[in-house]
Structures are given as C-alpha cells and as structure tokens.
Amino acid sequence: MTALAAAVLLLAGCGQNTAPAASPVGNAYLSTSVTEDGMPKLLAPKTRVRLQFTDDGRLVADAGCNSMQAKVSTKDGKLTLDGELASTAMGCPGPQQGQDSWLAGIISAKPTWKLDGDKLDLTSGSTTISLQNREIVEPDLALDGTRWTLSSVISGDTVGHFAGSENVWLTLNGERVTGSTGCNEFQGMVARSTGKLAFGELATTRRACAGNAGTLESQLLKGLKGEVTYHISGATLQLRSAGGGLDFTAVR
C-alpha cells in the first residue's frame, strides 16, 4: 500500500510539471502568405508583414513602411495589446499607407495565434497571416563583403529618411571600409570587437556637395565616427552611438 501511494503521488507530481506551451516570445516572423475570405491577398510589392515578439513583452510590427509597437499578452492563444499602438509617422507610397492601417486593425482586434514549430498563423475574422521564423526566411547576411545602402538616419527618437539615400553605401572588408556619401567616395580603417566597430578618420574625395547631398554626407560621416555598436538582422545593418545612428539595407 505504501509503495502504491508513493507511485500515485509521483504520477500526480509529474502531471503538475508539464512543459509550458510553445510561445512566439523572443522571436521575429516574416509573412509567407495572407488569405482573406479563403482567397489569397497580395501585399504591396516588395513588402512583408514583420512581427517581432521581444523578451520584454512588446510586439513590434510593420507591413513595409511604418513601425508600430505596444505591450502585448500572448495568453490563451490570443494577442492582446496593453494600450494603443505607437507608430512612426513616415509618409508611405500608395498601397503601403493602407497596408499599415490594415495590419494595425488586425493586431488591435485580439487575433488568435497558432505556433507550429517555426511557423506562426495569426487569424482575425476571415483573415489569416501565415508567417515563418525570420531566421529561416531571411538569414542574417555577413557584415563583410555586403554592400550596405543607407535607409534611415536616427537622431534621438527621430527616424529620418532622405531623398538620395539609395546612393549612399558602404562595404566592410576586414580592417577597411569603403563607400560613397552619395556625393563623395570615402575609405578608411575600422577596428572591431564583439558587437562593436571603431572607425578611424575617413578620407574622402573633395567634390562640393550642395543641398540634400551635403546634408546626407554630413549625417553619414557623423554616424561613422569613432566607436559604434552594430547589429545585423536579416538584410538590415544597424549602427548606433550615443543619441543616434544609421540603418542600412543590403543590396541584393
């Protein structure tokens, strides 16, 4: 009887220590397809839905233009926002503007979620967004040998986008960095440690850069001065220093 009671208690204890359900928290996902009313929905060209569930309980989302975020709960198979979505306010071309509003409406409506390995389905009403872990859909590119094109300039809490930034680029190879400010070419030395780059004095050509070209050159050279932290996520390179930074997108 004693042995039987001990076995019953052991089984009961095992039942109480079941593993927690899988959660999307700590991962980022990119859309692979969208359906509405059972029919495929096409997103704006060259865009995807991106959802990032941060370790500190935030959902960061975008549909190819503005970034939006809020505190979120994933309990009971639903996404429940804690408060309103905060969003950047960039002007987005044509269909991308409506796509932002469409995504905001879905994630604000307490959609259900289902995780199957590295695949995540998000459903609200008749709309289902199918996504896959970002590391599989868009593996991190190498820091060296990639041509990184400027996409935005960060100053404090402000994210700036400038006409002509597609002509601003850099490439790193070992201890050297080369590139273009969109007006002048530059080159120089760069040292590195874990998660950090330290740029030496950059040598540039001497063309006069007026207007927006001059502003872009100034912002770029300011961002490539001294020590910065860097982070690569898929095809995006982020450089950050005190109070600001630069974002680049890889040219494929």
Image (cartoon, rainbow, N blue to C red):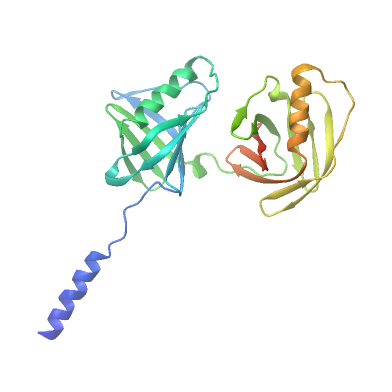
Can the viewer see residue 42 in this picture? no
Residue 180 relative to residue 208: left or right: left
The quarter holding residue 160 reads top right
Which residue is drawn at the image coordinates 76% and 35% (left, top)? 222
Which residue is drawn at the image coordinates 77% and 21% (left, top)? 213
Which residue in the rendered view is the most extreme toward the top?
94
Which residue in the rendered view is the most extreme toward the right?
206
Percent position of residue 72, x then y:
38, 41
> What count of labels does the image hold?
0
Quarter of the figure with the C terminus: top right
Can the viewer see residue 179 in this picture? yes
Residue 226 relative to residue 195: left or right: right
The quarter holding residue 84 reads top left
Which residue is drawn at the image coordinates 32% and 57% (left, top)? 20
Percent position of residue 103, x then y:
40, 27
Percent position of residue 64, x then y:
51, 27
Quarter of the figure with the N terminus: bottom left
In depth, the one of 145 and 192 nearer the eye is 192
Which residue is drawn at the image coordinates 64% and 39% (left, top)? 237
Percent position of residue 184, x then y:
83, 26
In depth, the one of 203 and 215 nearer the eye is 215
Which residue in the rendered view is the most extreme toward the left?
1
